[in-house]
Image (cartoon, rainbow, N blue to C red):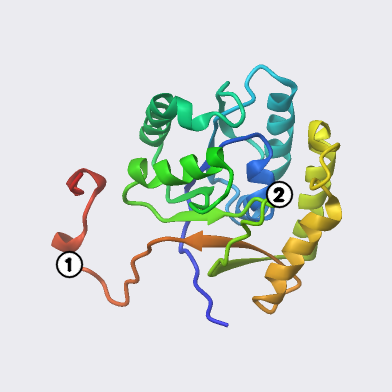
Amino acid sequence: MIHLALEDVREVALLAAHCDDLAIGMGGTLLTLKRSYPDVRVRALVLGGAGTPREAEEREALAALAGEVDLTILDLPDGRAPAHWDRIKDAMGEFARGGDADLVFAPQRHDAHQDHRLVAELAPTEFRDHLILGYEILKWETDTPQPVLMHPLTPDVAAEKLRVLMSSYPSQQSKDWYDESAFAALMRLRGVQCHQQHAEAFVVEKAVLTLAPLAPEHHRTPAQETR
């Protein structure tokens, strides 16, 4: 198994369509990040749930997984994101400019849910010079991706993710797919695929591999990118 590692993570940006997407897709990774880099700044933008019980659920869950989170939750209706393209684009642009992320997490582009998919499509238009990792959201659609990047989870991290999912989101408990055994099964499957007990998996659309130091003139900043 080939291992890659980031030298340092000072700030991460999290993008989600709904409250609970982040905990489902990358709760274990978020918990590991915070334990590995206690001073990491975590910023999150969630499109829907503001002013509803789901907002309180999301704040509780993310606090349990990452401690202090700079969290913005909008009030867009579930299942209607494409109809609010302009507002989402503006909100994501403002969010991107409000920080200096080393790493970005977003849904993966081939997610069957239109809200998730729109977030995934807009993410690289605002985070143009960043490593974006697309997380998978288990649900009833048969859209489970074939990820290429695995992040192993220790047993205690996997257990804590399950605890948060099952205790912090009472509004989701009635859904037949929102099940502890299902979430555990996906973590176990991804663990098998990287010779570990548990893991979370991510889709990577584009990354740059550097095997030797680049000359300064070869580095491109977001402002230098051609739009």
The residue at the point 75 percent across, 57 percent down is 157
Residue 144, x across and y down, in percent: 63, 59
Q: Amino acid at mark 1?
A: Ala
Horizontal side of residue 145 vs 84, given as left or right:
right
Residue pointed to by mark 2: 139
Residue 49, x across and y down, in percent: 64, 25
Residue 138, x across and y down, in percent: 69, 52
Q: Quick one: which residue is furthest to the bottom in this view? A: 1
The residue at the point 86 percent across, 36 percent down is 174
At numbered mark 1, what does the secondary structure look like: helix, strand or loop?
loop
Q: How crowded is the residue under tag 1: few (<14 C-alpha within 10 Å), some, or many (20+)?
A: few
Along the line of sight, which residue is nearer the eye, 196 or 33? 196
- Which of the 4 image quadrants contains residue 216? bottom left
At numbered mark 2, what does the secondary structure look like: helix, strand or loop?
loop
Horizontal side of residue 227 vs 56, given as left or right:
left
- The residues bearing labels 2 and 1 have C-alpha atoms spaced at a distance of 46 Å
Q: Amino acid at mark 2?
A: Lys
Task: In the rendered view, tell whether residue 207 sits above or below residue 88.
Answer: below
